[in-house]
Image (cartoon, grey):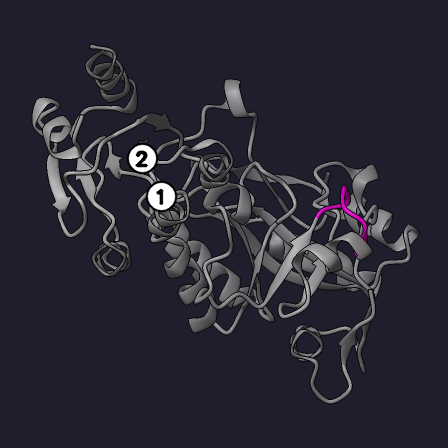
Amino acid sequence: MKLRDLSGQLSLNILQAQGDLDVSVSGGYTSDLLSDVMAYGKEKNVWITCQTHENIVAIAKLKNLAGIILVNSRKPDQATMQKAREENVVILGTSEPAFAVTGALYNLLKK
Amino acid sequence: MSPRNIVAEAKRKELDILGICDHNSAENAEALIEAAGRLGLCVLPGLEITSQEEVHILALFGELEAALSMQERVYASLPGENSESVFGQQIIANAEDEVLGFSSKFLAGATTLSLEQVVGFIHVLRGLAVASHVDRMGFGIIGQLGFIPPRLDLDALEISLHMSWDKGQRQFGPGRPLISASDAHFLDEIGQAATEFLLEEGTFDEIKMALKGIKNRKIIH
């Protein structure tokens, strides 16, 4: 499933659109520990987190993730937005908590 | 842990300088400074601040006033109230080990200050910003954020007693000054790890110089 379609089906807000919304998503990973995502995140995963520090962009880039979903209406820091634009890392947002988004995404990708 | 017990233990362990950094608070710094002064020990008042990212940063200062100003900023950004049944009593003591009161702030919680704001405020108050226990996953900067943000203006990194000095140097040095500290939460933990500096005297300014490696002051190990 393309990131664009996933975003639509989960009613996510596109907070930072610069990047590849047509990338094919391979799965998801939910964690707020960036070192954990570095260790276990897989290529083209969407990453669900509440962390907004600019380091999330670097991790997404490093692991070649499809994009980041920020939960609980968290807004990216200004530096995070700027870096994400520069590095073409798509950031999506939702008012839902990580549990709900993860469950919805899991069901969506399982279809 | 009480001011008189802490300084007696530090003296017994032959320490010269102590940093006191309660979680998100400097309420006990004054008592410790007074108690330590009687035994000729130097105390650096400070706080161990939890940033919004749940990274622990040590804020160390040369004067009590600066530590209390930092505390004011932290308290203004620290939501919630302490639950004594869950997190225990947060005692405020004087130099005679008498209980003056209890802090009702949720000191175990995270502030709403970003890491960059925490470090920025520390430097405005002319303090030292040290990333706590960088070798630990929980609340350590690398565990939380994957790596140390390159532009973050940290004065030093602290390794815990679980990591040897040599391993710390290999893993985190060179480039950033490294210190070792006990992070003592109990009396017997005091001095289990410490840093040796080459200084003219035991003061905050001398430590600052040693971290920057100026005028022959330095970190020995």
Q: Is residue B161 magenta?
A: yes
The image quadrant where one finds the C terminus of chain B is: bottom right
Q: Nearer the viewer, residue B56 or B102?
A: B56
Element carrying mark 2: loop
Tell me: residue B178, above or below residue B75. below
Name the mark on residue A44: 2
Mark 2 and mark 1 lie on one chain; the one further toward the N terminus is 2
- Tell me what residue is drawn at x 53 percent, y 25 percent: B87
Q: Are marks 2 and 1 in contact (CB under 8 Å)?
A: yes
Crowd tier of the residue under label 1, counting other residues whose Cα lies within 10 Å: few below 14, some 14–19, many 20 or above: some
Give, as a single range, the part of the protein colored magenta.
B160-165
Disc 1 residue type (three-letter): Asn
- Tell me what residue is drawn at x 15 percent, y 38 percent: A22
- Counting from the top left corner in percent of width and height, residue B102 is at 52, 36
Answer with left or right where residue B132 lies relative to residue B25: right
- Counting from the top left corner in percent of width and height, residue B162 is at 76, 41
Answer with left or right where residue A26 lies relative to residue B129: left
The image quadrant where one finds the N terminus of chain B is: top right
Disc 2 residue type (three-letter): Lys
Chain of the residue under the numbered disc 1 shown in the image: A
Q: Is residue B47 magenta?
A: no
- Tell me what residue is drawn at x 34 percent, y 53 percent: A54
